[in-house]
Image (spheres, grey):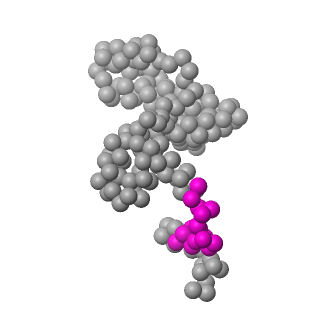
Amino acid sequence: MVATRELADELPDELPAEEVEAAKARAATLLLAFRHGNQLAFDTELDLLLAERTEREVVTLLVWIAAEAVRKAYAPGVADRVLRGLARRAPHDTAQVAVDEEAAGAALVLEAVAAGDIERVRGLVAGTADTTYLLGGLVQATAMMLPLLPEGEAEEIAAELHRRHGGRLPTPRARAAV
């Protein structure tokens, strides 16, 4: 595609190389948030772009990425038909990220774990197309359960996670005497 080559050729001339890389990272963040239904991350990154007035560069990169994806996935004549179809079906309100909230919810997974039903847990996870939504629900459930832990347990868990991921933290006082 001529437009793809023009965007690729123009972008480095418009921005210094480090700004191009930063814009690519922002474009990737927006795409990942949109693809995985993370409305909070999408809105946060979009707000930052609008505040910093860098949206033009990122939109240019998003269009370039989309053009490259279409070019690689479809023959030229087919690509134009696909793009026309997408344009006709574009939603009126594009600010919302699509999430599959009707798929397996975190509550169902927690209930299956509590019941010791490993097959049900596997089935729920395997049958959930939007696993980021499911993971977000599990993170929320974990955060809701943290205040119910005995004193010092949350700190001990955090210390263990830091140890596993390379960070060294002092042993929490609640466990130091044990």
Name the outermost residue toward the front.
115
Residue 77 x %, y %: 30, 14
**Left or right, residue 95 beside residue 64:** right
Asked whether residue 166 is in view, the answer is no
Instruction: Examine the rendered structure and indicate whether residue 174 appears above or below residue 46.
Output: below
Q: Residue at x 41, y 59 (%)?
A: 114
**Left or right, residue 149 beside residue 68:** right
Residue 86 x %, y %: 42, 18
Name the outermost residue toward the right.
51
Magenta-drawn segment: 144-160
Instruction: Examine the rendered structure and indicate whether residue 105 appears above or below residue 150.
Output: above
Q: Residue at x 34, y 14 (%)?
A: 81
Name the outermost residue toward the bottom.
177
Magenta segment, prevailing SS (helix, strand or loop): helix
**Observer-nearest residue: 4 or 54?**
54
* Position of the C terminus by quadrant: bottom right
* Position of the N terminus by quadrant: top left
Q: Residue at x 59, y 40 (%)?
A: 40
